[in-house]
Image (spheres, helix red, strand yellow):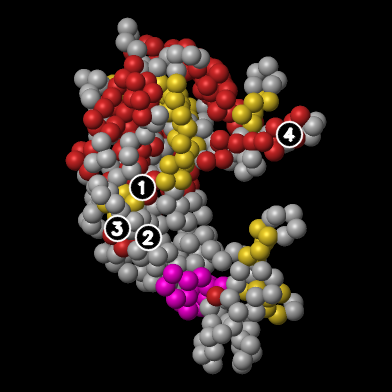
Amino acid sequence: MHLTAISLFSSAGIGDLAFQRLPVKMLVSCELLEDRHQVYQANFPDTHALSGDIWHLWERVVNETQKRLGNSELDILFATPPCQGMSKNGRGKLLQAVREGRKPPLDVRNRLVIPTLKIARTLKPRLIVFENVPEMENTLIEDESGRMVPILDLVREELGEDYDGEAQVVEFADYGVPQRRQRLITVFSRDAGMLALYHRRRTVFPPPTHAQRPSTGRLPWVTVRDVIAHMPPLDAANAATARGEDALHFVPLLDADKYFWVRHTPPEKGAFDNQCVACGFDQNPTHGNFRDAGGINRSSRDTPLCCLRCGKLLPRPWVKDVNGHRLMRGYTSAYKRMSWDLPASALTTNLAYACSDNKLHPEQHRVLSLKEALMLHTITDFDFQFARKDGRKVNTGLIYEIIGESIPPRGLEVMFSAWVKVLSGKSDDVFKSDWATADLPLFQNSTLPLAKSA
């Protein structure tokens, strides 16, 4: 018996891979951007795809879902609305600004939760799951009556008394993902089994399966070494060394200056702290950050670019202008190497750039290859192709964007696996501390299935 689900803000379907090995049938997907949705449709051909603005399509989402449900009820609504407009300010500060007449700037994308809730109220799914950035907790929107309200308060109000649930910031590395990525997962349900579980345990989230310092019943974090150490070496110095045999195992070239900085960056260090390669002096002050009078984090302005002993240029990121060289503005995490023995930092749409936070290979002179990024994002743990339904080529720029805009499906699979079992009427004994280690394949070595090339 399969449960039923719909997916909103589906993008290319990376999040929906969480359902691939579960007894869940995805009925309908909705996504604004056609290029992402073309990739989705190539990978989920049995799902009815609606491309366009959800404000205009929400009634069609309802109608198409009802048509496919027949006399059955919808089990799962999964929504991942855009996060770019979420506020980093505290809720109290924003509410005070509204009350004092200093209405903060609002991003209209945050209001996309409104048509999502229209769909939820109409279809009444047994389980509703939102995925977003942690800042969603503190974000205000203007509802349809013009009232300023925190998003999560509006969700609870609109769903009504039949639903109960919670929002929790989840570290995906704690669920076996070789990447440190924190997301806010909001779960509401009207299912009797889910509600009984929540009211008894005060949470519906399954216990983490991994930990940085594992205790009984948990495995160690899956590290960069575990996943990509076996990959053939690459070097960003020239075209001959920057590409491997696999079509997706390649890296962008670095110009001579950037390569100089990266080549002299030690393991687990950043290029802003590099020492002198001319005379060997290693006591040049390192880079740092500070908070200004307004509380804003700033990078140091007095970090030396030339060696204090010999006066030669240090291999630190610089900018050339009419006056010569000056230190590039940047934080200590720019041009910094990943650690072999930790999960990767969060992969963003800028993962192809050496200046992006903690994106240098642990020891080779380059960034991650696209193949390695797919592995660390756990996409290679699933059957997924970077192809389009219309047959057009998927360029690498779009693949970088799809990775950076999505979350690792492996972590979602762990959570949905538990929830699907409860919705299916199975005992909530699946929430014992060791439940996941018995049911799902876990990353314990570097042998992973390879994604199909574009």
Q: Residue at x 36, y 38 (%)?
A: 412
Separation of residues labelled 3 and 4 (CA atoms): 47 Å
Q: Residue at x 74, y 31 (%)?
A: 98
Q: Are marks 4 and 2 in contact (CB under 8 Å)?
A: no
Q: Residue at x 38, y 71 (%)?
A: 363
Q: Residue at x 74, y 54 (%)?
A: 294
Say which residue label 1 marks.
174
Identity, as a three-letter code, of the amino acid under mark 1: Asp
Residue 295 picture location, percent across and down: 70, 54
Ranked by sequence position, the earlier of labels 3 and 1 is: 1
Q: Nearer the viewer, mark 3 or mark 1?
A: 1
Separation of residues labelled 3 and 1 (CA atoms): 16 Å
Q: Residues within 10 Å of mark 3 (few under 14, many from 20)?
A: many
Say which residue label 4 marks.
96
Q: Are marks 1 and 4 in contact (CB under 8 Å)?
A: no
Say which residue label 3 marks.
227
Nearer the observer, 311 or 240: 311
Identity, as a three-letter code, of the amino acid under mark 3: Val
Say which residue label 2 marks.
342
Q: Nearer the viewer, mark 3 or mark 4?
A: 4
Ranked by sequence position, the earlier of labels 4 and 2 is: 4
Q: Nearer the viewer, mark 4 or mark 2?
A: 4
Q: In this view, which residue lies farthest toward the front?
A: 200
* Figure check: 89 above or below 48: below
Q: Are marks 3 and 4 in contact (CB under 8 Å)?
A: no
Q: Which residues are magenta?
A: 255-272
Residue 185 in view, yes or no: yes
* Figure check: 277 above or below 230: below
Nearer the observer, 33 or 128: 128
Separation of residues labelled 2 and 1 (CA atoms): 12 Å
Numbered disc 3: secondary structure: helix
Residue 187 picture location, percent across and down: 43, 28
